Amino acid sequence: MKPIWIVDDDQSIRFVLEKALLREDLPTRSFTNARDVLSALAADEDKGPQVLVSDIRMPGGSGLDLLDKVKERFPALPVIIMTAYSDLDSAVSAFQGGAFEYLPKPFDVPKAVELIRRAVEESQREEVGEESIAEAPEMLGQAPAMQDVFRAIGRLSQSNVTVMITGESGSGKELVARALHKHSPRANGPFVAINTAAIPKDLLESELFGHERGAFTGAQTMRRGRFEQADGGTLFLDEIGDMPFDLQTRLLRVLSDGHFYRVGGHGAVKTNVRVIAATHQNLEQRVKDGGFREDLFHRLNVIRLRLPALRERREDIAVLTRHFLQQSASQLGVEPKRISEAALAWLGQFSFPGNVRQLENICHWLTVMAPAQMVEPKDLPPEVAVSFAEPPVDAGAAAAVLPLTPELPESLIAAPLGRPLLPGLPVRGAAEPAAQGWEQGLEIDASALLSTDRTDVWDELTRRFESRLILAALAATRGRRIEAAQKLGIGRNTITRKIQELGLE
């Protein structure tokens, strides 16, 4: 994340904010005057701030002048204006100049940090509309079903027609939408994506159409919605089948004439947006059930593209696996893992209920968790191994499910009834029941350690457990520590300290 820039000639103010933001894992950069800020922006615009926090009265130029100049070049950058002179004129001037918020001194530090964090979130939302389509992951696939999709994208390359993409969750519908945008006449415009199922109903209207300042509790500044952010480009509405019925009416109006109103607004806003919608649901059935407007369905369903599930294109699993292993290694800054043909054969038999997204997550998991550079079947994650736990079958049928090649480890060949043991558990005799999970493996490890003279069993097993848990969380969040901490339910400082203590840097 880019740093928070703090501009104030008062050293004590800069010091307090720097320390408070550092405790929140928010990087900072400080300046004593507006002139130095403008020089830094001119030197390298790409390394500008995530949020700018500036005093009003400083030597070498006022904060309001700085606000005007910054907004000319970076209209989406949130700027928070601070002042010890809490007068009406200063507040009005700040908001008229486009400030995100006005912060009178002396301020409560936790509230100031909370305000800055909200500004960071706003900045990150605005960046969605400015994503470079060149950074989107490439689409791969040699299967006939994917070649049909590629041909359809090619035929639509010079069109602005509305497209409906259908397919199971995780099959790559957003990638198709990005490809349609990239190869369209709108390629130089923004691509904005929103998952209508992931946003609460009460907030979805504001997310789509924006809101005016004071429109509702918490609306402390005017905010552009996704339709405005996507003006001149493409808006991707994912999981459109889950959109609330009353919002479907507003969406239909926008698609009909290109006009809408912000929440709490009185003036119509005009937008020029190409809409691409996607769903994993049967919209025809949703229309019959009364959950989706028929007129909106026909408005969206101009051209329909069906994206195949990964189990329908198994011949692509090998090339996708190698691609995701390379991609994951690049993101984590490590050497890419290689995968054996035996391990690929296992993946080729897996059903992948989560489709391509699940395969990508498995590759992230392998990049972090596989002990050697060559990934073997024993290194695959538990869900892949457990997927082959079938009822009793004869040897021929077991071999058909899992070829007993010389590359397969003994721990997999020796599993009873053709059922592989979970990775990491010791090999058991054919007469013993299959392993029940990681808890049983933990019990076995604990018993082995307790049978020795060691007196640090608790610390040893706790260290191993915490290491695996944190590494798995970092793999799931692609190395983003704050998000990993949130998923684990621990604090940001805690995960940073644990990473250092456990030597996971």
Image (cartoon, rainbow, N blue to C red):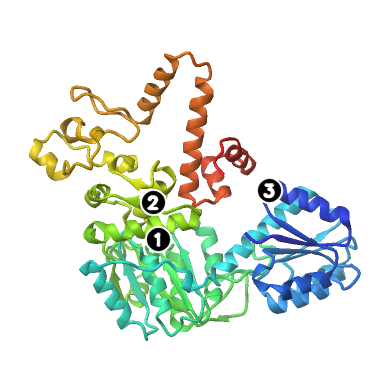
Q: Is residue 57 left or right of residue 80?
A: right
Looking at the image, is mark 3 or mark 2 nearer the viewer?
A: 2
Question: Which one is earlier in the sequence, the residue at label 3 or at label 2?
Answer: 3
Q: Give me the residue at 34% from left, 47% from top.
A: 374
Q: Give me the residue at 55% from left, 49% from top.
A: 483
Residue 229 at x, y percent in the picture: 55, 74
Residue 135 at x, y percent in the picture: 48, 69
- Give the residue type that dot 1 points to: Asp
Q: Mark 3 sits on what residue?
A: 24
Q: Mark 2 sits on what residue?
A: 337
Q: In the rendered view, would you say 390 is above or below 446? A: below
Position of the N terminus, as image quadrant, is bottom right
Q: CA distance from mark 1 to mark 2?
A: 39 Å
Question: Which one is earlier in the sequence, the residue at label 1 or at label 3?
Answer: 3
- Give the residue type that dot 2 points to: Lys
Q: CA distance from mark 3 to mark 2?
A: 34 Å
